[in-house]
Image: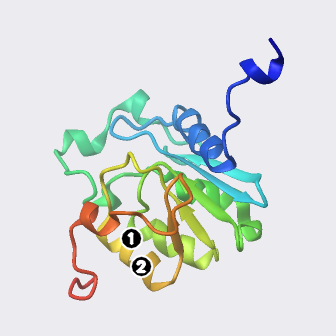
Amino acid sequence: MTLKNIRKPRPSFDENFIEMLDIIAKRSTCFRHQFGALVVKDNKIISSGYNGNPRTFPHCDEIGCIRDELHIKSGTQMETCTGVHAEQNALLQAGKMAENATLYCNGFPCKICARLIINAKIACVIIPKRINYADKEGMRLLETAHIKLMNEHGKKEWDNLYNIIKIDWKKEKI
C-alpha cells in the first residue's frame, strides 16, 4: 500500500475556503445567524470577518438580542441591531487589497453589504449552495453591478439562483 492509495482527494481552493467559513462563523456572537466571510486574491486569504457588535461594545451573548426582544423578523429593520456583518468586517480588514478579489461568504449579502462589495471592487462572490435565504435587493444590486456570482463548485452562475430568491429581476424594483 502506497501513500497515494490512502490519501483523500485534495479539496479545491473554493472547497477549502468554503469550509473555512464555518470555522470563522463560530466566532460570531449573534444568536440568530453565524456568518463568516473571506476576501481572497490569487488563492491567498487577504482578510476574514464574522458578524458581531463593534469593538468595545457588549455582545449579544452578554446582554441579549434586541431584535429577539422586539420580535423583529430576520432581514428587516437592520438599523435596530448594532451588529456588523461578516462581509463588512472582512472588507474593512482588506481595505484596498479587496479590489479584484473574491469574497466568500456563507450567506447572501444584504443590500448594505452588496453596496460595500460593489464599492470595494470585488470581482466575484462565492456562496455555498446550501444557503436557502437570499436578500432580493442585495442580489439585484450585485447583478446590476456585474459582480460574478458563483457557487462552491465553480459554476459560472447559481444553477437555480432565480428560483431560490423567487423574483423576476426585470420587474422587481429596489
List x then y, in percent, for residue 81: 36, 52
Secondary structure type for disc 2: helix
Secondary structure type for disc 1: helix
Q: Residue at x 35, y 34 (%)?
A: 31
Q: Quadrant of the C terminus?
A: bottom left
Q: Amino acid at mark 1?
A: Gly
Q: Nearer the viewer, residue 156 or 114?
A: 156
**Residue 138 has which mark?**
1
In the image: residue 161, left or right of residue 22 = left
For the image, the number of numbered tags is: 2
In the image: residue 68, left or right of residue 24 = left
List x then y, in percent, for residue 18: 57, 44
Q: Nearer the viewer, residue 122 or 96?
A: 122
Report the Cα–Cα distance between label 1 and label 2: 5 Å
Q: Residue at x 38, y 71 (%)?
A: 139
In the image: residue 100, left or right of residue 36 = right
Q: Nearer the viewer, residue 30 or 35?
A: 35
Which residue reaches farthest bottom? 170
Quarter of the image where one finds residue 130: top left
Q: Amino acid at mark 2?
A: Leu
List x then y, in percent, for residue 13: 69, 48
Q: Nearer the viewer, residue 10 or 29?
A: 10
Q: Residues within 10 Å of mark 2 (few under 14, many from 20)?
A: many
List x then y, in percent, for residue 102: 64, 63
Residue annotated with mark 2: 141
Which residue reaches farthest right? 2
- Work out whether 156 lies above or below 93: below
**Residues at discs 1 and 2 in contact (Cβ within 8 Å):** yes
Q: Quadrant of the N terminus?
A: top right
